[in-house]
Image (cartoon, grey):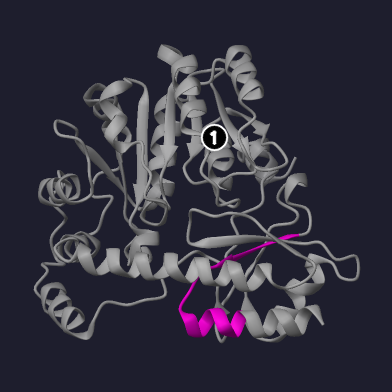
Amino acid sequence: MSLIENIIRPEVRALAAYHVPDASGFVKLDAMENPYTLPESLRAELAQRLGDVAMNRYPVPSYAALKEKICRKLGVPAGFDVILGNGSDELISIMSVACAKPGAKVVAPTPGFVMYAMSARFAGMEFVGVPLKPDFSLDKPAMLAAIAQHKPAVTYLAYPNNPTGNLFNADDMVEIIRAVGDSGIVVVDEAYQPFAQASFMPRLPEFDNLVVMRTVSKLGLAGIRLGYMSAARDLLTEFDKVRPPYNVNVLSQTAAEFVLDHVDVLDAQAAALCDERTRLSAELTALPGLEIFPSAANFLLIRIKTQKIHADNVFSALLDRKVLIKNVGKMHPLLENCLRVTVSTPEENQLFLDALKASLA
């Protein structure tokens, strides 16, 4: 056996690394980023704050000031705290490691965020995917059957879901949370909440097994890599034992604290993107041979319906025109011939529309 075979777990060897394509020189519409920057006056003030940061010192590991501001500004219920992560990816990893008892399983609808399955396998847990219905709604009977059979330690429900963009039925989600009960946690992933205006965060006091997870990435701070999650105090205490010390750096901490004092700017940007989502969806719907799915996120899922051209060809043609979107057709059978595009500025959305029309011609 080779060195790699001797030391690397087979389930890790079987995985492919998470791929991030080089977007240099492209209109970048593949990663659901907010295209807007802060106003110039705020950027100058933030630069001053960052210049005053003591980068020779470790962060204060409690992050008390930032956590208090998140709770106060972002709707965390009174009496609930948060744990911070280097993006929501780290929070998913923290929960996976904390819950990875021998034989533990993770359940999530598919297609969904790929890191649910990858993080489970990294932690040595089995991942059980439950396919959505063809309209991308939850298959509640199948979810309840999987929960009864597998007794998952962790169940993920993205609200709204990536890459489909839709909000699952809230009553179905409550039924799933109750069905899991004391045998596991249910993580409601609200990465796209700024564009959905729907949340389970206010319902945390109702369910001891509920975790609500968010990120500030889609809100306009993808570069600082900051996620947060809230849950009952006993759960957070256990998860915090797994969290690496100093996992949020001082520059990210300072930037987040500053921007949260100006969250109205980010809210206005999110509202503008929601308006653009409506306009872009209408423009795409008017094009022949496309199916546009309803979205509560800052992206749209498009299915190529014409027999003349495949989504792979459209994706390649867009690349030739320096427009980068996401080809999701191979992620899951339900996504066959599908592309996902980030909603951006009016100018970038028009560049995408023009390139798409040329690619479909």
Residue beneath the point at 59% across and 55% down? 18
List x then y, in percent, for residue 305. 81, 61
Mark 1 residue crowding within 10 angstroms, few (<14) / some (14–19) / many (20+): many
List x then y, in percent, for residue 343. 51, 69
- Asked whether residue 349 is drawn in magenta, I would say yes
Q: Quadrant of residue 321?
A: bottom right
From this view, report whether residue 188 is shown above or below residue 45.
above
Kindly tell me whether residue 236 is visible in this rendering: yes
Q: Which residue is mark 1?
A: 120
Q: Which residues are magenta?
A: 338-352
Q: Amino acid at mark 1?
A: Ala
Kindly tell me whether residue 231 is visible in this rendering: no
What is the tally of numbered marks visible in this picture? 1
Residue beneath the point at 31% across and 37% down? 201
- For residue 157, side relative to residue 98 (left or right): right
List x then y, in percent, for residue 288. 78, 71
From this view, report whether residue 273 is shown above or below residue 13.
below
Quadrant in which the C terminus is drawn: bottom right
- For residue 35, side relative to residue 248 (left or right): right
Q: Nearer the viewer, residue 153 or 173?
A: 173
Q: Nearer the viewer, residue 152 or 40?
A: 40
From this view, report whether residue 353 is shown above or below residue 217.
below
Quadrant in which the N terminus is drawn: top right
